């Protein structure tokens, strides 16, 4: 057995005659365990919150969305549709018309997006599962499905055919407006359902059939604003993008869910980085406590070190003793802290001890990458603090 490792192990597991050193070493060991647990739990909690937030944000988003790179609308001809249906990567697609318009009901008014959808829309996003009152749309019907917040603000009722929801959109064209009453396209719509997802989406959309939207906005039969696509399981997104571009031409842009929620993803990444840096700061403070403990052990073992030096053990080997001791203590704290933290996360996932509401458990997510992050962080910082502490061994100690 290597002499430095043997002595380091003895120092790591044995108690010093100096009680103060034992206390400081114990505090450092407990601190490493606690900071390891904190780092992993924080990362797992944030991963859970991130997944929870993205599930809400992505509730209305397809795998891919195709938009025109110039203007608002583009044309999808029957040949292109046939090629999309034969694609090896596309499970289903839906033609969409989306435009921000003005709504009025019983003297109340607001701006929201009217979203014309075809009968394949619910195959792409399963949006109808978010319906909590009424019924979903039928083709060519003037019925609409509105968000819960829109319904609340306007005081909408369902299936009220005596008092419809009025929609107004500017007519396309150029020139002066002589008669204000002729400047807008108008539609009378009748709510048949209410959906509820989150505050942002509940105040954003009024869903109608694509035929009603085309007529209301003055668009042609094959004119749409975007195409929403659901990919086949395990489909290669890069290859799917290339095929879609080949079919529809280069005058389009394709966005995935991350790109559709770009600001949310960036915010979550920034928060994740902040959580990691804050937790790492706690780990740094703990490991420098370990470095202080090792320095005190070096001073306490000064007579032993003189003996080792006098019998031929080199200064480098003596430094290695305390460097190895630091790594042993760090590794012990890392392993024990990870085991306890993983246990806490798995218990929360399976038994939901901590609840946000009586029906909603606090979200956590076990991820192997978080284990890799914790192990890498603790080992690197433990290596640095042990190296700094062992560097205090010099020839002055042997005099």
Image (tube, rainbow, N blue to C red):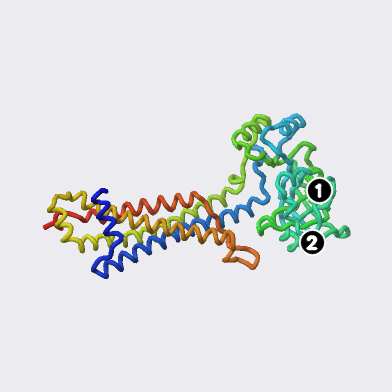
- Residue at numbered disc 2: 156
Q: Is residue 362 visible?
A: yes
In this orientation, which residue lies closer to the viewer: 48 or 152?
A: 48
Relative to 117, residue 350 above or below: below
Q: Secondary structure at mark 2?
A: loop
Query: Cα distance, mark 1 to mark 2?
Result: 27 Å
Relative placement, left or right, of 231 versus 128 is left
Quadrant in the picture for residue 164: bottom right
Name the spot of residue 210 as percent of width and height, x first.
78, 44
Q: Residue at x 65, y 29 (%)?
A: 246
Dot 1: within a 10 Å radius of its alpha carbon, few (fewer than 14), some, or many (20 or more) residues?
A: few
Numbered mark located on residue 8 in the image = none
Name the spot of residue 282 as percent of width and height, x first.
39, 61
In this orientation, which residue lies closer to the viewer: 361 or 134?
A: 361
Name the spot of residue 105 as percent of width and height, x first.
79, 60
Name the spot of residue 322 as percent of width and height, x first.
26, 55
Q: Residue at x 76, y 51 (%)?
A: 207
Direction bottom: furthest residue: 19
Relative placement, left or right, of 199 versus 322 is right
- Residue at numbered disc 1: 182
Q: Residue at x 18, y 50 (%)?
A: 315
Residues at discs 1 and 2 in contact (Cβ within 8 Å): no
């Amino acid at each position: 057995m290597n002499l430095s490792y043997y002595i380091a192990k003895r120092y790591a597991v044995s108690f010093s005659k100096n009680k103060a050193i034992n206390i400081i070493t114990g505090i450092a060991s407990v601190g490493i365990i606690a900071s390891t647990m904190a780092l992993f739990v924080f990362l797992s909690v944030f991963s859970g919150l991130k997944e929870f937030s993205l599930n809400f944000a992505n509730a209305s988003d397809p795998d891919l969305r195709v938009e025109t790179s110039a203007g608002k609308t583009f044309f999808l001809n029957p040949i292109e549709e046939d090629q999309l249906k034969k694609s090896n990567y596309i499970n289903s697609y839906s033609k969409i018309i989306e435009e921000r318009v003005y709504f009025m009901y019983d003297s109340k008014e607001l701006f929201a997006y009217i979203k014309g959808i075809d009968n394949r829309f619910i195959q792409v996003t399963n949006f109808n599962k978010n319906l909590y009152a009424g019924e979903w749309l039928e083709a060519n019907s003037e019925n609409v499905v509105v968000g819960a917040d829109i319904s609340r603000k306007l005081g909408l009722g369902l299936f009220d055919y005596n008092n419809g929801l009025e929609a107004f959109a500017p007519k396309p064209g150029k020139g002066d407006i002589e008669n204000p009453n002729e400047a807008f396209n108008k539609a009378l719509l009748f709510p048949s359902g209410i959906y509820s997802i989150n505050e942002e989406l509940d105040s954003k959309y009024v869903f109608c059939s694509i035929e009603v939207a085309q007529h209301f906005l003055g668009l042609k039969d094959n004119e749409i604003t975007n195409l929403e696509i659901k990919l086949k399981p395990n489909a290669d997104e890069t290859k799917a993008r290339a095929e879609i571009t080949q079919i529809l031409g280069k005058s389009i842009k394709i966005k995935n869910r991350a790109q559709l929620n770009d600001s949310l993803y960036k915010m979550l990444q920034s928060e994740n980085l902040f959580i990691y840096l804050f937790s790492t700061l706690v780990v740094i403070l703990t490991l420098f406590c370990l470095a202080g403990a090792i320095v005190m052990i070096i001073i306490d073992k000064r007579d032993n070190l003189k003996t080792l030096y006098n019998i031929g053990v080199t200064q480098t080997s003596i430094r290695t003793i305390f460097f190895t001791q630091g790594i042993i203590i760090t590794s012990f704290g890392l392993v024990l802290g990870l085991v306890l933290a993983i246990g806490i996360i798995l218990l929360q996932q399976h038994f939901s001890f901590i609840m946000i509401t009586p029906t909603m458990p606090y979200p956590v997510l076990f991820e192997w990458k978080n284990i890799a992050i914790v192990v890498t962080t603790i080992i690197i910082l433990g290596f640095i603090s042990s190296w700094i502490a062992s560097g205090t061994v010099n020839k002055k100690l042997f005099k």
